[in-house]
Image: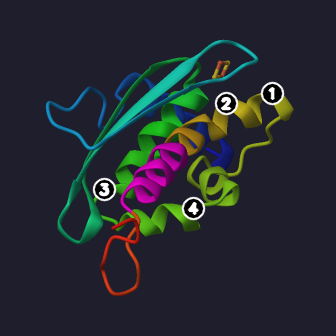
Amino acid sequence: MSSADIYRELILDYYRNPRNFGKLDKFDIDSRDTNPLCGDEIEMQIRVGDGKKIEEIKFVGKGCAISQASASMLTELAKGKPLEWVKEVSKEDVFKLLGNPDLGPSRVKCALLGMKVLKTGVYGYLGAHYEDQDGSDPMV
Ligand code: FES
């Protein structure tokens, strides 16, 4: 079995048995987006814990194997990380999780949908909970 075959199997496994699939009862971040090319969508919910860490994260969605697998893999990677870590996540990180498959432009959008949802949600939260270096609220 080639490494491409192994990753193909892995993507299908995440698609059929998505990790962290579902909705949270309590959450601080709720973010969703749609792939404009196909209408498929992903929603992610995050509960933020002490130290602005991703305490819990789940997703729901419908779409192709690549979009659902990459979203699921990202939730696994994100759990327990500080929210600030999300700023560091790159396209290359997502491609690496998927085994660097040879993706055409439309499939790239599939692969990156989960990352877009994650970043949009976390950036919105960080913006709304911005604190100055000393921890004070700059709007007060
Ligand atoms: Fe719709 Fe991939 S075909 S997200």
What distance separates the C-alpha of mark 2 from that of mark 3?
Answer: 22 Å
> Mark number for residue 89?
4
Residue at the top extreme, as displayed: 39
Residue 13 lies, with reference to residue 115, above or below; the image says: above
* Few, some or many residues within 10 Å of mark 2 (<14, 14–19, 20+): many
Amino acid type of disc 4? Answer: Val
For marks 4 and 3, the one nearer the N-term is: 3
Secondary structure at badge 4 equals loop
State the mark number for residue 79.
Answer: 3
Q: Give how far across and how far down residue 71 sits, in percent.
A: 48, 38
First of labels 2, 3 by sequence position: 3
Q: Quick one: SS at disc 3?
A: loop
Residue extent of the magenta highlight: 118-129
Residue 122 x %, y %: 44, 51
Furthest-right residue in this view: 105
Is the residue indicated by label 1 positioned so its CB lies within 8 Å of ligand 1?
yes
Q: Amino acid at mark 1?
A: Ser
Q: Quadrant of ligand 1?
A: top right
Mark 1 packing: few (<14 Cα in 10 Å), some, or many (20+)? few
Tag of residue 59: none
Residue 91 visible in the picture: yes
Numbered tag placed on residue 110 in the rendering: 2
> Mark 1 = which residue?
106
Most foreground residue, 139 or 17: 139
Mark 4 residue CB less than 8 A from any atom of ligand 1? no
C-beta proximity under 8 Å, tags 1 and 2: yes
Q: Residue at x 40, y 85 (%)?
A: 133
Question: Residue most toward the bottom?
Answer: 134
